[in-house]
Amino acid sequence: MMTSRFAPSPTGLLHLGHAYSAILAHDMARRAGGRFLLRIEDLDQGRARGEYVEAIFEDLTWLGLTWDEAPLRQSRRGEVYRDALDRLIALDAAYPCFCTRRDIAQAADAPQGPDGPLYPGTCRLLPPAVRRARMATDAHAWRLDMDAAARLAGPLTFEDHGRSIAVDPLLNGDVVIARKDAGSSYHLAATIDDAACGVTDVVRGTDLLASTHVHRVLQALLGLDAPRYHHHGLVAGDDGERLAKRNGARPLAALRDDGVTAADIRARFALSS
Ligand code: GLU
């Protein structure tokens, strides 16, 4: 059955950009007589807060959106992600990374990626004995060895708005698939959860288009079905830039307090109810 989803991170209040994404995903499912799911991406336990989860439910309900099934909470799915990580390690497609943020920032001549400098590969090159010794003592994340992963996966494409896009596995470099503090990462958890919930259509902003190249590689390695993607344009703030707190993104809750209605929000995006 056609299934779409909205997958916010409860690290702040939702704003118009989130509303746009949620309404598009919801309406696509409802028009098709399909399912619309809600997933709470609360892997970052340092930043995720229960009150923001409650606010997500409240804001979506105010927008007139309904979701099917109890929302999935990523913070409760550690074992599922661990199994997938173990499979990637067994494929020799992942390696432990001991670098701190500072190590990475200081690495000379790291090429620039879509979301900042690419990881320079420091820990991929560690001699096995050093790696083994450090694993016993040092905190580590896990990174996808993209060269190895791309070789294993072979050439791939994904569908965005019905068009086939060739995957560029090296676009994002060796991304983190398990954070030091979380045992997983956005890339791994989102990919697994979309497949586990039978999501057929992923609706999300173009800011995540580069991530889709990673997700497609992970799907291939883990034997998961690839959904169709629909990356949408980002809602602009007062300055024409992507909406964010600094350029006037007011929380939906504040707009609601001002008397704005869900119909006003739909009208702003020229979306019928
Ligand atoms: N949790 C992500 C975010 O809030 C979205 C993930 C996704 O749609 O794949 O940006």
Image: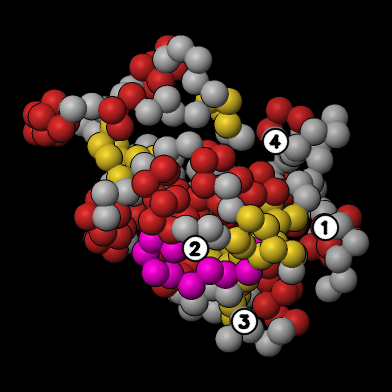
Q: Callout 2: few (<14), some (14-19), or many (20+) C-alpha neighbours within 10 Å?
A: many
- Given the image, on which type of amino acid does mark 1 rest? Ile
Residue 40 falls left or right of residue 273: left
Q: Callout 4: few (<14), some (14-19), or many (20+) C-alpha neighbours within 10 Å?
A: some
Residue 190 vertical placement versus 103 (above, below)? below
Contact flag, marks 3 and 2 (Cβ < 8 Å): no
Is ligand 1 within 8 Å of the beta carbon of the residue shown at mark 1? no
Mark 4, residue position: 244
Contact flag, marks 1 and 2 (Cβ < 8 Å): no
Mark 1, residue position: 265
Residue 266 vertical placement versus 248 (above, below)? below
Residue at horizontal 54 percent and vertical 73 percent from the top:
199
Mark whose residue sits in front, 1 or 4: 4
Label 2 residue SS: strand
Q: Residue 39 got which mark?
A: 2
- Given the image, on which type of amino acid does mark 4 rest? Ala
1 or 3: tag closer to the N-terminus: 3
Label 3 residue SS: loop
Mark 3, residue position: 2
Rounded to the nearest angstrom, the CA distance separating label 1 from label 4 is 17 Å
Magenta residues, as a range?
A: 219-230
Q: What percent of the width, then of the height, locates residue 215? A: 50, 55
Rounded to the nearest angstrom, the CA distance separating label 4 from label 3 is 31 Å
